[in-house]
Image (cartoon, helix red, strand yellow):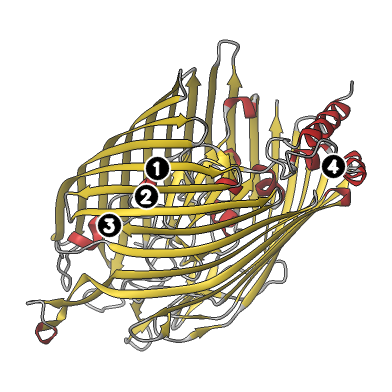
Amino acid sequence: MPQRALVLSFGILSLAVGDLEGTDLDPAETKPPEGDIASLVNMSLEQLSALKVETVFGASKHEQKTTEAPSSVTIVARDDITRQGHRTLRDVLNSVAGLYVSYDRGYANIGVRGFNRPGDYGGRILLMVDGHRLNEAIYDSAASDTDFPVDVDLIERVEVIRGPGSSLYGNNAFFGVINVVTRGGRDVDGTELSSSFGSFDTWTGRLTYGKRFANDLEVLVSGSWYDSQGNERLAFPEFVAEHLDGGSSRQAFVKASYQDLSLQGGFGRRHKDWPNAAYDSVPNSHDPNLWSVDERAWADLTFAHEFDGDWQFSTRAYFDRYYFDSNYPYDYDTDPTTRPSINQDRASTTAAGLEMSVSKSFRDRHLVTLGGEWRHDFERTQLNWDVAPYVLTLNSRSSGDIVGAFLQDEWQLRPDLILNAGVRYDYYSTFGDTLNPRAALIYNPWAATTFKAIYGQAFRAPNEYEINYAGVISVPNPDLQPEATRTSEIVWEQRVGQRWRSRVAAFWTDVEHLIELGNVDVDRDPATLDDDLYQFRNLGAAVARGAEIEIEGRLPGGIRTLASYTFTDSENPDTDQRLENSPRHLGKFAVQVPCWREKVFASLELQAMSSRRTVAGAEIDPFAIVNLTLFSRELIKGLEFSGSIYNLLDQRYSHPVPDDFTYIGPISGNTIALDTIEQDGRSFRVKLTYHF
């Protein structure tokens, strides 16, 4: 029997029993309507497979349907990443409802639902690869650009889990969790060679081997590289940066599993030139120039086993290493004829830890999970010095421990009603302890309809940079306390027929004890503030209220559409001012059209954003960008081709930057503060991938 007939027969049989691995049909139905059968007959293989309800792992630390997850979830699949020409995780996240990533020519910072403070490095989002935490202890950074240490071609799916997740994961799961699930050896099943060329003299290359062997051993090994000259000419007030936007990265990734054991490890190193003369450095300096290096390395070994009696046990031992280095050119004597002096900033952290969890199912009504985590930071080092003459400004060295324990119960109150409740306790050697609960009531009144009522609390611990960084005008603050948030959300998920599904959400988030840079409070009395010294303090608060709608359609002929709109009103309740870099309106639209025999696809993507405030209080103009990609596969056996044009209409737009992006104007000699950084105009990429 041909493959299509086999899949179609299975699809009709599954519809008849109302299962189809999670299609939202009533189990009481024993025969599909005539229209549904006709609809199935006209569907492609991909459309038939799309009838399955997507699953998510990161919402509850086990695989479950997205409709049963205690969160508002979006899944970005590998096919969508490939067909839409996404080059980095940043591109992927910019396509997701409610998310937006700002770029300051050094780092990309992830924002969600109106909260993306310039310069926070995305630390209020927990970023994971296959459940392994990537946020490091120095800056909390959630790398999403070329510093993300996994090649985007190795991504099987990206799970975006909105809302507080500290009840399971502890730190950084403040506004949400992003879990990048990688491909396995069986998914590659051979060797892949890939290369691309694009604007700004950008080249990439990748070699990947993956296989699942007869003895159940599964292996994936991959190496990647990236080199770009960057934008050749970028204009700033009083100077033009030429040939100062380049970057390069190297990545290696290994993944292996055998029966109950799995091993994963990765390494990524990125070098990036900064064209914007940030932190009072010398504008347009080539010798030396302003640059930064980020290195990430990790490994974890996991054992997971299912015992008799519906007992499941898993444990993970892991190791992490992060290293940062940067080079700043300074003109201390203000003489433009002399070579700038070099200031070095360096940071590193090494950690190891152990996670354990055990779960038990009771009469198919309760799934109880109990777990714990211990992590030890062997070193958290920050150094800063002038090279010649040598002057040491910062030498901060510390270590620390984190202990956490969590409990989660998924209780099937009725066949159509689930209560998911959990709580986690964390103890930090730096500030003490914190307790964070989450609860969700999930109601399925009809097979195609799901309602969720969700409440959760989360925290972000002060990182090493905020606690211990000291300079000429800054001092440490060992008394910093964690930021805290409380979020309430109502979600309605609806499937209409076999082709349409939607998600509507309303949310309210309160944030307290935000960590901000302020004047030193000598005696905890506003009257004793020192105007000449700064430190990080728990000064801020925020409120975000909004609504979100997402609609997906799979139309006749294999056409797929996805549209979303997010409205957010985010403000500082103490000043009633809108938060910086917080758009009230965020819109996304994407369409994929098969052009020829499901082998050639055209994809168009629209991303639009309303105006935003800068740190200085100015308004940035709204913008909309369009990306276009042509993708083909198997025109020649084993060969994939894609060609993409990004920012097709050459829209000029900018992103806000932090208030320490300042430099001395080479013409006026005055301190110039940058409000915004211009983004790239129209660019292109062509890519070839060969599988054998």
Q: Nearer the viewer, mark 2 or mark 1?
A: 1
Dot 3 surroundings within 10 Å: few (below 14), some, or many (20 or more)? many
Q: What residue type is labelled 3?
A: Ala
- Residue, disc 4: 598
* Residues at marks 1 and 3, CA–CA distance in whole angstroms: 22 Å
* Residues at marks 2 and 1, CA–CA distance in whole angstroms: 8 Å
Q: Which of marks 2 and 1 is nearer the N terminus?
A: 2
Q: Which of marks 2 and 3 is nearer the N terminus?
A: 2
Asked where in the image residue 188 lies, by quadrant, the reply is top right
Label 1: state its secondary structure: strand
Dot 2 surroundings within 10 Å: few (below 14), some, or many (20 or more)? many
**Image position of 518 with respect to 103: above or below:** below
* Residues at marks 1 and 4, CA–CA distance in whole angstroms: 43 Å
- Residue, disc 3: 461
- Residue, disc 1: 408
* Residues at marks 4 and 3, CA–CA distance in whole angstroms: 48 Å
- Residue, disc 2: 167
- Tag 2 and tag 1, C-beta contact below 8 Å: yes
Q: Which amino acid does label 2 sit on?
A: Ser
Q: Which residue lies furthest to the bottom in this view?
A: 668
* Residues at marks 4 and 2, CA–CA distance in whole angstroms: 43 Å
Q: Nearer the viewer, mark 4 or mark 3?
A: 3
Q: Earlier in the sequence, mark 1 or mark 4?
A: 1
- Total label count? 4
